[in-house]
Image: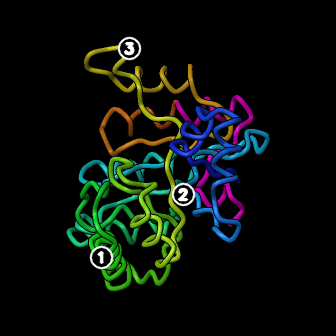
Amino acid sequence: MTTLSRRTFLKFSAVSFAGLAAAAFARPAFAAEPAKPQALFSVNPSSRRLALTFDDGYLNVARLLEVCKEVEVRLTLFPIGKVITANPDLWKRALDEGHEIGCHTYSHPALGGKSYDFVAGELSQFMDVARQRLGIERVRYFRPPYGSGWSDEAVQRAARDFGMAIIMWDRTNDSKKLAARPTWRDVATDFKKNARAGDIVLYHFQYNEVAALKSIVAHCRAQGWGVGTISDLTGA
C-alpha cells in the first residue's frame, strides 16, 4: 500500500539542498517533524488489481447493483449519509451482495478549511446512520466530498479518531475530453485508454458510468487485472 502527500511532495521538491540544510540547522534539535497527511491514491501496480469506487448515491444505485451481479464484481461504495437514511433497504442490499460501504460524510459539504468539530460532526452523523439503518459498527474508509481538505489537519485528525483511512483516487471519468455529452461507450473508451493496474478509480452513480461497468470489467479481466474493493487491494 502506498500513501502520498502531493502538496508536501511538491513543496519540498522545490526547495534547494542549501535551503533544506539551512532550515535543518536553524531548527531546534528537539523539534519533531509534523506528521505528513496520509491518504491512499493507488496501490502497487504489481498487485495486478484495481478498485472501482462510486460516490454519492442519489440515483441509479439499484441499476449498479444489478450490473455488479451480472459481472460478478464487488465494489467500494461511498454513499452520503442522507441517501442511506432515504433508502436504507437499498444499501442493506448492497451490503448483502458483498459491497463495501465507505463514509462520504452525512451531508456532502466541502471540508477544506472547516474546523475539527465540523468534520467530526459529519463523520459522527454518518456513523449514527450506518449503525442504526445498516447495522454497521465500523467503517474502514472515508472519502472527503470533492476531495476537498483531505490533507487538512482537521480532516486528518477526525479520520484517525473515527478509525478511518482516507481514500482518494488517481483515476476518474475524463470522457468529456472525448465528447461534450459522453455516452457509456465514451466512458468505457476513456477507461481503456488510461487505466492501469493499481488504480483507484472514482466514479459516481451517473447513468453513463453505471452503463459502462460491464465493458470496463471485461477490459480489466482481459488485461489480467482483478477488480475488487479497497479492502481487496490493501489486504485489509
Element on which disc 1 rests: helix
* Left or right: where 129 falls relative to 186: left
Residue type, mark 2 in image = Pro
Residue displayed at 35% across by 44% down: 204
Residue displayed at 68% across by 67% down: 236
Q: Nearer the viewer, residue 218 or 179?
A: 179
Q: Nearer the viewer, residue 18 or 166?
A: 18
Which of disc 2 and disc 1 is earlier in sequence?
2
Q: Which mark is residue 37?
A: 2
Q: If the image is split into quadrants, where does the N terminus sit?
A: bottom right
Residue type, mark 3 in image = Leu
Residue type, mark 1 in image = Asp
Q: Nearer the viewer, residue 190 or 151?
A: 151
Give the Cα distance between marks 3 and 2.
34 Å
Give the Cα distance between marks 1 and 3.
42 Å
Q: Is residue 112 magenta?
A: no
Bounds of the magenta span?
216-236
The residue wearing badge 3 is 178
Residue 39 at x, y percent in the picture: 55, 55
Residue displayed at 56% across by 48% down: 5
Q: Which mark is residue 78?
A: none
The residue wearing badge 1 is 117
Quarter assignment of residue 202: top left
Element on which disc 3 rests: loop
